[in-house]
């Protein structure tokens, strides 16, 4: 299990990285944390001729908390974001989800933006980007553009990024005041990809539910958002858990794999959501 | 006064080296060696039509490429059938490189050697092999149906068929007032040591000598096999096991193809060659175990006494049978556990499939047998409405019935005769440990809180320390250093420590002075290997016997020098001294000097031993008749039969009423391996075994699709438990000595994993109220079972 | 460009490992784990799966545990690497190494270096973990021998040794890890 040969490019600016990307086109692959990519290379499931290693690119390792979002640069490691107190204060969902990403040694190297660019429907972060109505900032030979989450995830392991585009940052949207968030998942072993997971945001105003929205892990092809505001009812004291579970079951389309059947995952994600609603409303 | 080392939880001598990065594992050797890699079959069953290596020939760093037709003489012949058996009527073994047919995904077809593994894999990727794909036989149902055959030479896919019967089962069954039938299934798992296999070979052309390191559980076996394959005199082959990163059974099989090919290419090329198995190779080209279908019919009286037990097993042996049919033989005999059915018949079929071959994995057939027996015990209890522990105890063999002969032949071809054990006492300890009698109240309380909990139990007896023999060799140097060698290998069991404990006690020397070497044919040429929980029993006793020889010799020599009778001497703290007069003494090192009369003096000690040093009796030869120079001893231990350890486990599990997630709340073990040499190490063995058992019960399986692809050949998808999945393990010990060996000990290596699937199945069954008949079990499977048993039922048995 | 018959370009890589600068010339694809083990002959770091799951190859990169099989050697420039060899010697074992030896935290010893590096970094940030936290802290590393119980015990013991480093090590906790890790 050793990677095939490749040409290693180590740009130091975004412009250089983009120039390499332009030159090598679809023969290149961006290497950031590499925690998903390098196993694929070692198993020779992919053998790109060029790796554009962005770890030396200046300015991509910053977390910025803004009024409407938390902006995370492409070299911010999961651990860095997880431990960032201002990011947690601004958007607790980030930490709530990140603690479920693999294990600490992986989180120390793996990048949050890289996970999103990998777009594994079993990953935690795509669901977070979807639920926060986040935006991916892409730079390519044709310039910069913002790609909203709803357009970013095209299919399993497939994004709207062009082969010559680099995701330089993402902006996770912040929730309105009075929003409670949570993240729950169930995996066979700690740190494994979840059999099913849910990210949830419930906005309350004086014990009245103004909005309830969820996105999911491992049970939808792409992480989209389910609006549960109707199903859950208005009063925080008596949420309609059965209606929530029904709505979740109707929304998801989980596959069967070697670890669980689709039917099981459907049940599981509905139950995880039900329990998470109860937990958030009883905080 | 020196404390007896036997029985002390002393720290391991091997650890300071291993915790500081000083281990020497296989791939830590030979940095300049060429690297081997293999093109392996992507198909489960296919004919090889053509192999084209031309694309690979220009790979930079390539050294050589070989296919089957390049292999000369015995290298190209089938690999040996290591353990023949009269009932193994259609044995088939593989080749080093497949000649014309492949029989499982992962079978080696082409060998590549290059300057490093990267280049070797580059070349492998450019070799083209054309296959004609044949219908694969995957799974026991398909093997039994035999619509397609794995090997034409094995009709019905049957490798072996064996029946053993004690008493007349048909008559006893017909007469039994109650009868039940259980159809059971247990899935495959694998040893999966953290270090895969590996071989490193150095050929000394000047000396025509092969030195071979293998991550193996038997160096003498590998040495003999390689010498035979390469037509080398045994004296020209050394085999050494360096530090071995876990074995659990897979490394007892030998020679693996790579163990032949790596030394063969090293000789051919005149250059060191090394192969380090990677994780993917380990999944598809080593060995698996456990897969069986079982059908149990049991007849019993109204008190739960088993009158007749009729068991039929279908055992999946994979593509080849190099290790014979040890696994199903053990299942069929050790199934009986601590019980004495009135009559017993076991019939098994060992069947070929186009999957990775099946050889012993820790427990080696016992987990399957215990699973069958213990599911049966629970079913009897449910049928009669009796307490599950009570039903078991009514069927126990009692201490006063020892030795107890079951009338069957065990895996070593010798009678299955238990030597020791106190099963009622073990059960009493287990019930106390887990709180058996209090559980009903706890369960009721939990139910009132909406929680579902269950208590499970499983009992086993394990034949350990099978022969034929092991040896011990001891030399005491003039410095007082004690060198101990035994031929079997070590993979983490702490042999350097426990054998040193034995020697320290026997010789009366400080343990710091004792240095143990294992698995090096240069130091001990006669040995069998480490498997079947045999190392402590076999080598421990052999080393004790060798130490007694050395001690007797030391006392003889010292007695002469001190002009006393040997009976008046003792050795304490490395000093030979007169009992009751410790002032009259000499160091053991001095005795070593005296034991070896020298012509040449090269240091202070040697000077004392030369012929001109004075004190020599001119009328006697320097070495007395019947003596040999040196303070050295060698002895072997060869038992007439195995010694039987036993244990009983109980677990409390909680199942989520909605999601069917399964959590082990408590796991309790009572274990009896006789007197423990080092209780800390025994505990560690039990912990590790239970963790593997938990893996096999709840997480691990080998998922093949119908085409014979192993779908979970990675640590991502083969769910070996992390710490988060393993429960805290509570232990208690009974120490019933074996009457069979000088130290009175029994093996402990495999024990922990043996009953775990049975115990967890029992506990889940108790929590859920419906029978569990297939293991391992995942949440998704439990959830589906619930759909099928929508109405929880109290009775767990199935009507006969 | 590289192709089947063109030698790969080589990179001179200088890294600092356990405070010592090492230089070797390797292709870009050389995994950091292989670089340490075979180019620098620091074989204390072990390779158990080469896909980032088992944790045997865990080293400290600027003090943080990372999988050395999931980095390339060329990416390790400008980082301070610590391997198990850098955490103590036979005569002067580090606290985690000492604890493993005292608590029988290892059997075959193959996975051990990855645990020791992981736990060393963990205790830097969490010097006084509970048994439950200790178990959680080691849950990203696979061990096939020990069943983990004595590794949990070793984490707790290492915390004790660290805490009393200036006072001399206290006697070994004699109770089973049970004292700290009681069943529910």
Image (cartoon, rainbow, N blue to C red):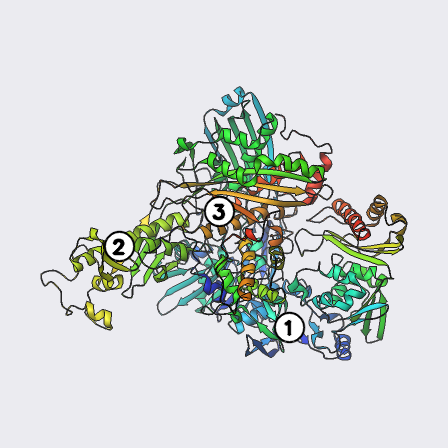
Q: Which residue sits at x=62%, y=45%?
A: B664
What residue is disc 2 on? B551
Residue nearest the observer in this picture, B56 or A69: A69
Tag 1's secondary structure?
loop
What residue is disc 3 on? B750
Q: Is residue B60 above or below residue B569?
A: below
Same chain shared by disc 2 and disc 3: yes
Q: CA distance from mark 2 to mark 3?
A: 33 Å
* x and y percentages locating residue B179 in the rendered image: 57, 24
- The chain identifier of the residue carrying mark 2 reads B
Quarter of the image containing the N terminus of chain A?
A: bottom right
Of the residues tagged 1 and 2, which is closer to the observer? 2
User: Viewed as shown, does residue B637 lie left or right of B194?
Assistant: left
Q: Is residue B573 above or below residue B767?
A: below
Say whether residue B193 is visible: no
* x and y percentages locating residue B73 in the rendered image: 43, 56
Which circle's residue, 2 or 3, is located before the other in the chain? 2
Which class describes the residues within 10 Å of circle 3: few (<14), some (14-19), or many (20+)? many
Tag 3's secondary structure?
loop
């Amino acid at each position: 299990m050793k990677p095939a040969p490749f040409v290693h490019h180590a740009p130091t600016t975004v412009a250089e990285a983009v120039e390499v990307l332009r030159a090598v086109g679809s023969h290149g692959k961006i290497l950031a944390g590499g925690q998903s990519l390098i196993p694929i290379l070692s198993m020779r499931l992919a053998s790109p001729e060029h790796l554009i290693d962005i770890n030396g690119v200046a300015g991509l390792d910053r977390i910025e908390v803004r009024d409407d979002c938390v902006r995370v640069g492409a070299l911010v490691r999961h651990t860095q974001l997880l431990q960032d107190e201002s990011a947690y204060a601004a958007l607790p969902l980030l930490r709530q989800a990140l603690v479920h990403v693999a294990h600490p040694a992986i989180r120390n190297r793996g990048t949050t933006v890289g996970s999103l660019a990998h777009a594994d429907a079993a990953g935690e972060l795509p669901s977070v980007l979807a639920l926060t109505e986040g935006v991916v900032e892409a730079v390519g030979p044709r310039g910069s553009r913002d790609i909203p989450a709803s357009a970013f995830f095209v299919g399993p392991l497939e994004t709207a990024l062009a082969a010559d585009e680099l995701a330089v940052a993402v902006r996770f949207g912040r929730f309105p005041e009075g929003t409670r968030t949570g993240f729950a998942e169930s995996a066979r072993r700690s740190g494994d990809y979840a059999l099913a997971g849910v990210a949830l945001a419930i906005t309350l105003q004086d014990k009245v539910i103004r909005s309830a929205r969820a996105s999911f892990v491992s049970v939808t092809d792409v992480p989209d958002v389910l609006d549960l505001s109707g199903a859950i009812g208005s009063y925080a004291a008596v949420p309609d858990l059965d209606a929530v579970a029904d709505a979740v079951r109707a929304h998801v389309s989980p596959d069967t794999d070697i670890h669980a059947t689709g039917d099981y995952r459907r049940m599981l994600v509905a139950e995880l959501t039900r329990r998470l609603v109860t937990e958030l409303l009883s905080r | 006064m020196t404390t007896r080392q036997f029985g002390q939880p002393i720290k391991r001598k091997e650890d300071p080296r291993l915790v500081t990065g000083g281990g020497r594992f296989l791939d830590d050797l030979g940095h300049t060696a060429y690297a081997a890699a293999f093109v392996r079959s992507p198909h489960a069953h296919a004919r090889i039509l053509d192999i084209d290596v031309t694309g690979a020939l220009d790979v930079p760093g390539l050294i050589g490429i070989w296919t089957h037709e390049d292999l000369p003489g015995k290298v190209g012949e089938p690999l040996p059938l290591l353990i023949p058996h009269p009932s193994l009527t259609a044995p088939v073994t593989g080749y080093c490189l497949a000649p014309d047919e492949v029989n499982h995904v992962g079978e080696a077809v082409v060998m590549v050697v290059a300057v490093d593994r990267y280049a070797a894999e580059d070349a492998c990727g450019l070799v083209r092999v054309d296959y004609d794909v044949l219908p694969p036989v995957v799974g026991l149902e398909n093997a039994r149906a035999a619509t397609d055959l794995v090997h034409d030479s094995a009709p019905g896919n049957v490798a072996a068929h064996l029946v053993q019967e004690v008493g007349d089962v048909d008559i006893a069954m017909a007469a039994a007032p109650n009868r039940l039938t259980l159809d059971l299934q247990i899935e495959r798992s694998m040893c999966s040591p953290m270090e895969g296999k590996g071989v490193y070979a150095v050929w000394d052309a000047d000396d025509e000598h092969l030195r071979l390191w293998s991550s193996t559980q038997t160096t003498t076996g590998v040495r003999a096999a390689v010498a035979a394959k390469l037509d080398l005199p045994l004296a020209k082959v050394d085999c050494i096991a360096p530090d071995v990163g876990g074995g659990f059974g897979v490394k007892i099989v030998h020679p693996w193809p790579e163990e032949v090919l790596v030394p063969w290419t090293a000789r051919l090329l005149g250059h060191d060659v090394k192969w380090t198995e990677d994780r993917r190779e380990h999944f598809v080209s080593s060995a698996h175990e456990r897969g069986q279908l079982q059908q149990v019919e049991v007849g019993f009286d109204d008190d739960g006494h088993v009158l007749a037990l009729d068991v039929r097993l279908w055992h999946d042996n994979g593509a080849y049978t190099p290790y014979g049919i040890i696994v199903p033989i053990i299942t069929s005999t050790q199934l009986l556990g601590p019980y004495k059915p009135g009559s017993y018949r076991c019939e098994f079929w060992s069947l070929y499939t186009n999957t990775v071959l099946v050889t012993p994995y820790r427990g080696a057939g016992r987990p399957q047998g215990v699973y069958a027996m213990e599911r049966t015990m629970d079913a009897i209890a449910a049928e009669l409405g009796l307490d599950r522990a009570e039903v078991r105890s009514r069927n126990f063999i009692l201490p006063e019935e020892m030795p107890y002969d079951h009338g069957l032949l065990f895996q070593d071809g010798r009678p299955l005769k238990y030597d020791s054990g106190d099963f009622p006492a073990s059960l009493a300890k287990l019930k106390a440990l887990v709180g058996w009698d209090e559980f009903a109240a706890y369960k009721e309380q939990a139910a009132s809180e909406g929680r579902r909990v269950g208590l499970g139990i499983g009992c086993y007896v394990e034949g350990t320390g099978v022969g034929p023999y092991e040896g011990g060799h001891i030399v005491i140097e003039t410095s007082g250093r004690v060198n101990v060698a035994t031929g079997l290998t070590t993979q983490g069991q702490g042999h350097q420590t426990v054998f040193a404990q034995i020697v320290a006690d026997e010789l009366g020397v400080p343990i710091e002075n004792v240095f143990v070497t294992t698995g090096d044919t240069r130091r001990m040429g006669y040995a069998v290997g480490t498997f079947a929980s045999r190392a402590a029993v076999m080598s421990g006793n052999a080393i004790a016997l060798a130490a007694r020889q050395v001690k007797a010799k030391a006392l003889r020599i010292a007695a002469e020098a001190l002009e006393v009778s040997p009976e008046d001497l003792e050795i304490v703290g490395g000093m030979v001294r007169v009992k009751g007069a410790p002032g009259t003494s000499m160091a053991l090192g001095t005795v070593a000097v005296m034991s070896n009369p020298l012509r040449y003096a090269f240091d202070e000690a040697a000077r004392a031993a030369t012929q001109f040093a004075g004190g020599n009796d001119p009328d006697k030869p320097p070495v007395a008749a019947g003596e040999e120079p040196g303070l050295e001893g060698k002895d072997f231990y060869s038992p007439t039969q195995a010694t039987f350890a036993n244990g009983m486990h109980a677990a409390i599990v909680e199942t989520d009423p909605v999601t069917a997630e399964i959590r082990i709340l408590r796991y309790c073990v009572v274990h009896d391996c006789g007197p423990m040499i080092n209780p800390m190490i025994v505990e560690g063995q039990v912990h590790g075994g239970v963790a593997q058992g938990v893996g096999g019960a709840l997480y691990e399986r080998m998922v093949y699709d119908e085409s014979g692809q192993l779908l979970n050949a990675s640590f991502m998808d083969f769910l070996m438990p992390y710490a988060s999945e393993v429960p805290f393990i509570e232990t208690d010990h009974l120490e019933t000595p074996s009457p069979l060996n000088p130290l009175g000990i029994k093996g402990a290596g495999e024990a922990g994993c043996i009953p775990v699937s049975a115990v967890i199945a029992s506990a889940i069954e108790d929590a859920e109220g419906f029978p569990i008949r297939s293991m391992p079990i995942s949440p998704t499977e439990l959830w589906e079972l619930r759909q099928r048993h929508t109405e929880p039922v109290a009775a767990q048995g199935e009507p006969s | 460009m590289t192709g089947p018959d063109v030698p790969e370009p080589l990179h001179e890589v200088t890294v600092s490992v356990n405070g010592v600068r090492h230089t070797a010339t390797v292709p870009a694809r050389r995994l950091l784990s292989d670089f340490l083990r075979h180019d620098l002959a620091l074989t204390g770091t072990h390779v158990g799966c080469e896909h980032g799951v088992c944790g045997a190859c865990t080293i400290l990169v600027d003090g943080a545990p990372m999988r050395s099989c999931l980095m390339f050697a060329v990416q390790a420039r400008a980082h301070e690497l610590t391997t198990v060899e850098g955490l103590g010697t036979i005569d002067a074992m580090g606290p985690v190494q000492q604890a493993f030896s005292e608590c029988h935290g290892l059997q075959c010893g193959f996975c051990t270096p990855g645990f020791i590096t992981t736990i060393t970094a963990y205790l830097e940030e969490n010097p006084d973990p509970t048994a439950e936290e200790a178990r959680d802290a080691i849950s990203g590393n696979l061990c096939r021998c020990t069943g983990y119980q004595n590794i949990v015990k070793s984490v707790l013991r290492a915390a004790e040794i660290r805490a009393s480093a200036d006072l001399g090590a206290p006697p070994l906790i004699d109770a089973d890890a049970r004292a700290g890790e009681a069943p529910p």
